[in-house]
Image: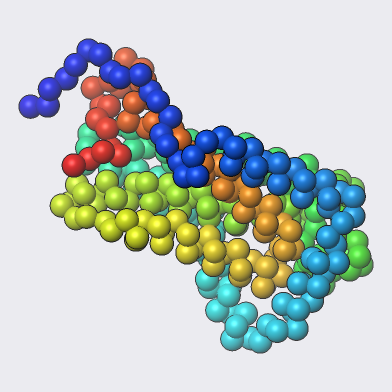
Amino acid sequence: MRETTGVRRQPRLRPVRPAGWWWDGLLLAALVALTVALAQGHLFGLDRAVADWSEAHRPTAARWAAMGLNLLGQGTPLTLLAAGLGVLLAVRLRSVRPVLPPVTAFVLTYLTIGPLKVWTARPAPSASVKEPFLAPEQTLPLFQQDLPVRFAQSYPSGHVANAIVWYGVLALLLAPLLRTFGRAVPPRLVTVVRVVPPLVVFCTTIYLGWHWLTDSVAGLLLGLLLDRLLRRVPWDDLPLPGPLRNRDRPFTSVP
């Protein structure tokens, strides 16, 4: 029988690396600076050069391979997978805590990525070769609110930001879930889960011409910022409502 106590330790933010809030401030400042630079018409030459190079070096086989690899950044499947792992771990531990990271990540991405896309209103590189068939120079600027929303949601890259956030959540849940089955997860594997899929999505999104280079850089900055915020949350110590306190077993420290 598990011993219980009426006193739970006060929640304290979990450590992240690099430590300190200066890194978060740097990520936010870089995102703001990049957005301001684009709003003033800078970096368009770099975006166009990368997009043109990608188009000129995109044979059919490479394009199909990149499209398959880019599926690693699909937000909806990643959300469902993370939610499924959270529920499975919650059932095995008889605790609601494992579902908190997926729910929080969903709310956080929903309130940031989508609104930023709508606010910045930037078309994708492909907007010149398919609907709305803009002139090439018209596909680069931000704040084109005169376009229908579906044609101007390129900045920042949701694929890249979602990949960073959701693979971070998957890495958080995977290790304790496998420990409940008596399996250990090497730390290097956790790092691979966190790093490799977002890196693949970053490269393939640019290569396929689905986003400008600066779109993906902005998605990278935003995703890293959100990931650091999520990694700081003390999931095992968050206070829960009264009815859930008998389902509050910690999960990040499962033996």
Residue lying furthest left in this view?
A: 1
Residue at 22% x, 40% y is 254
Residue 175 in the figure: left or right of residue 109: left
- 28, above or below 152, in the image: above
Residue 131 visible in the current orientation: no
Figure coloring? rainbow
Residue pictured at 59% horizontal, 86% vertical: 61
* 163, 145: nearer the viewer: 163
Residue furthest to the top: 6
Q: Quadrant of the C terminus?
A: top left
Q: Quadrant of residue 204?
A: bottom right
The spot of residue 138 in percent (x, y) is 90, 61
Name the spot of residue 222 as percent of width and height, x first. Answer: 63, 46
Q: Vertical placement of 202 versus 238: above or below?
A: below
- Residue 54 visible in the picture: yes
Quarter of the picture holding the N terminus: top left
Q: Residue at x 64, y 66 (%)?
A: 205
Depth check, front residue: 11 or 155: 11
Image label count:
0
Residue 76: horizontal and vertical position, in percent?
Answer: 52, 52
Of residues 16 and 138, the one nearer the viewer is 16
Residue 175 picture location, percent across and down: 29, 50
Report which quarter residue 58 is drawn in: bottom right
Instruction: Left or right? Give the position of 211 relative to 95.
Output: right
Residue sitting at 52 percent across and 71 percent down? Answer: 69
